[in-house]
Image (cartoon, rainbow, N blue to C red):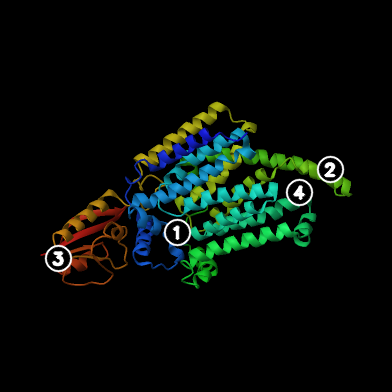
Amino acid sequence: MALSKKIVVFILLICLITRVYALSARPVDHDESIHAWMSYVLEKTGKYHYDPTYHGPLLYHIAALVFYLFGDSIFNGRMIIVAFTLIGVLFACLYERWMGRNVYIFLFVLLFSPSVLYYSRYMRNDMILVPCFIAAVYFYLRYAESSKPYFAWASALFLSLMVCAKENAYIYLFIFLTFPLIYGIYRDGFDYVKDKLFRWNKNKVLVLAGSIAVYVFVFAFFYTSAFRRPYGLYEGTFGAIDYWIKMHELRDHWEPIYYYTKIFLEYEFLSLGLFFGGAVIFIKKFLDSTESIKIKAKSVERSVRSKLGKVSRFEAFAFYWAVLSLIAYHVLNHKIPWLTVHMVVPMALLGSIYYKDCKLTRAALAIAMIATLVVAVHVTYIDYNNAWKEDLVYIQAQPSIVKLADRIIHLRKEGYSVLIYEPENDYWPLPWYLRHYTIAYSSHWIPGFDYVVTTIRALSQVKEHGYRVIGVYQGRPGWYYYLMKKY
């Protein structure tokens, strides 16, 4: 029996409150400021150029619209991610169709997982991908049950939105597209391949053509900026993949293969425990269902396939999603805390399916859930700036950068000229905070300004030009800006 509307509304209300509370309290960090700034420029000028360094166009186009309608604030920018999170939780509620009441365990993780909660209040693309994939999987499973074309088209829509959001959507796409083939062969042998390749009817043609049309239209619309830049089609496919393959080879943001282990143990111990418990049960169930396979005659095949039904499509997909995600993100050289969400969600899903079959007692689960809640509250609402000790927090801008921005604004209102001089243009998030004021930014020295903001890279040079330090501000851990005044 599906969850009642009142329960779903209550769950969504919890999700909304936990995401919106003190949403603007944390300073805009390096990446967020670039995302917000690019959206602001798009909203003001209509100009956008896809750069895989800053990920797909979806966030920028949605944010530009939101800024136009409601104002260009970081609260509004972060609310976009909150909205997608609500969509993900809503579709997760519909998983009750296959999980029963165990869906509550999965929903708890979506609501209070430290990584999911922290990054669903953060203006970046990862918590667009996760909710969209939850929705895409729901519609795929509904199509598998009913063969109704509109379910397939809806799934294609969410898959395309994912690819328009961030390049690691291609990992999701690989998982999504390969699973039906693998599961079909598992259930029906190679007859499945024959059926899909050589037996066509009007409905299958309609499903395939419609799905491709939906996917391509959404993809083309965003990557070409409403069909204004046709070359964006190449950039969003071969260009994006080529770029990230090169980043992998260059070991960009390289971390050892065990990097996520510490994060799991510190923050995601509940999902980790659920995953191990669920994986053991799934493997045992899978082996039990295949141990007596004997392909001798069609009658035997039918009985075997009936036995194989012990592992449902939903169970198999959860296991496949979790395992392939763990492999992919551990193999990739590029390892960042926010990528944790792409592993935590499928891990929790698999474990939640088998919760009642696990040896885990209710007391142990309750303790793990309470501990998870405490950790989530601490890192999200209390220690969110502590990039020194919190492994989940990364390159987080510090409150002093807001004070520097306020001081620069005050100087501009007083009529003084200000130059932000940084040889490598490492001055974010200042452009976002100063977006409403005329400020000069340069990677080369320009004389004649009343005040100069610089970093250690050019501090001695600016002093030689007759400026003295009147303020030091920490932009992010270990990175300082110096406000300097002409003698």
Nearest to N terminus: mark 1 or mark 4: 4
Residue for point 45% across, 37% down: 13
Residue 121 visible (yes or no): yes
Residue for point 49% across, 49% down: 340
Residue 18 percent location from the top left of the image: 41, 39
Residue linked to disc 2? 303
Cβ–Cβ under 8 Å for marks 4 and 2:
no
Residue linked to disc 1? 253
Camera-nearest residue between 422 and 223 = 223
Secondary structure of residue under mark 4: helix
Residue linked to disc 4? 187
Dot 2, crowdedness within 10 Å: few (<14), some or many (≥20)? few
Instruction: Say which mark, if any, is on residue 450.
Output: 3
Nearest to N terminus: mark 2 or mark 3: 2
Residue 5 percent location from the top left of the image: 53, 35
Residue for point 53% across, 38% down: 107
